[in-house]
Image: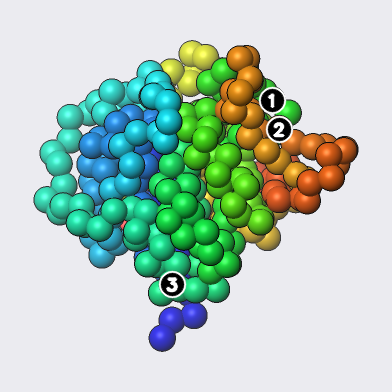
Amino acid sequence: MTDKIPLLIDTDPGVDDALALLMAFNDPNHELVGLTIAAGNVGLDHTVRNALKLCEVAGREDVPVYAGCADPLLHPAVDAAHVHGRDGFGDIGFEPASRSVEAEHAALAILRLSHRHAGKLLLVALGPLTNIAVALKLDPTLPQRIARFVVMGGAVSAHGNITAAAEFNIAFDPEAAHIVFQGFPHIDLADWEAVIAHGFLHGRAEQWLQADSPRARFYDRISLQTRNWSADRRGDHWHSADALAMAYALQPQGAQELLDRPVAVELAGTLTRGATVVDWNRQEGRPDNATLLMRYDQARFESLIQAALAAG
Ligand code: BDR
Ligand code: CA
């Protein structure tokens, strides 16, 4: 019997997803019960392959990996290969992992694990919300069994990163995000604007990547392309969206400012499709369904990353 918190991560690795997963692998207070894999940053075949490889590099082949939906629910979407590399892991040409993906579909695994760990499960979504939306449609009682749900997604004052108003994970599958934001009574949200407020210096990240560990060596290689892209576009600071969400998930006590508000997803806008609309003044009578992470302890965040990279 373990008193660790069971943790299930839905993810589309992805360079920042990989850092978040290393943080989860390294956490002593959570038991990682599975990775369910979404399409997003790149196609599902790559995101599955990347998840399996990262588990292998980190010696975490005990963590089952489940493949999910290959496409958004309704409309095709453009991936983020320009940020993460064509294969999602910086195009370094790694040997595939020897292990294969589980036979069970991700949406079914989410439901099964929600029953096995009912009332205790921490669910963290680091990619488009397609798998979780499908799970919800199959069984709308899913939220009743989730203790806490953390989502990386959205842009709370419409400073988007993939369009002017929308953040990538929500914009990739807005219908799925809409289903999830309507179906879950409460979401802990780490949005893109929080990510921009919690960058860290490239020079510091390079120091962390010098750690004498297979994890740091692998991460140094897969992140090089995106670090260069980021330095060209965004200057001195590197931003790791999924790592911030994971810090908030693993150590919520590091949050220094949180706000509860109603949040809904725009589906129809010609300029704003995929935007997360926050009712800041609570004008529309909807209940608060999200806690927005506004500020997180930067030193704690950075030390979690550093420790995850150095772990053996
Ligand atoms: C989110 O989009 C993806 O590209 C990243 O992995 C992260 O989950 C940031 O907008
Ligand atoms: Ca991601």
**Label 1 belongs to which residue?**
158
Q: Nearer the viewer, residue 274 or 148?
A: 274
Counting from the top left corner in percent of width and height, residue 40 is at 39, 33
Q: Residues within 10 Å of mark 3 (few under 14, many from 20)?
A: some
The residue sitting at 16% across, 52% down in the picture is 100
**Label 2 belongs to which residue?**
277
**Label 3 belongs to which residue?**
115
Q: Nearer the viewer, residue 44 or 210?
A: 44
Three-letter code, disc 1: Ala
Q: Nearer the viewer, residue 307 or 25?
A: 25
Q: CA distance from mark 2 to mark 3?
A: 32 Å
Q: Is residue 307 visible?
A: no
Q: What secondary structure is marked by label 2?
A: strand
**In the figure, residue 119 lies in which quadrant?**
bottom right
Residue 75 sits above or below residue 255 on the image: above
Three-letter code, disc 3: His
Q: Earlier in the sequence, mark 3 or mark 1?
A: 3
Cβ atoms under marks 2 and 1 closer than 8 Å: yes
Mark 3 or 1, which is nearer the eye?
Answer: 3
Q: Quadrant of the N terminus?
A: bottom left
Counting from the top left corner in percent of width and height, residue 80 is at 40, 24
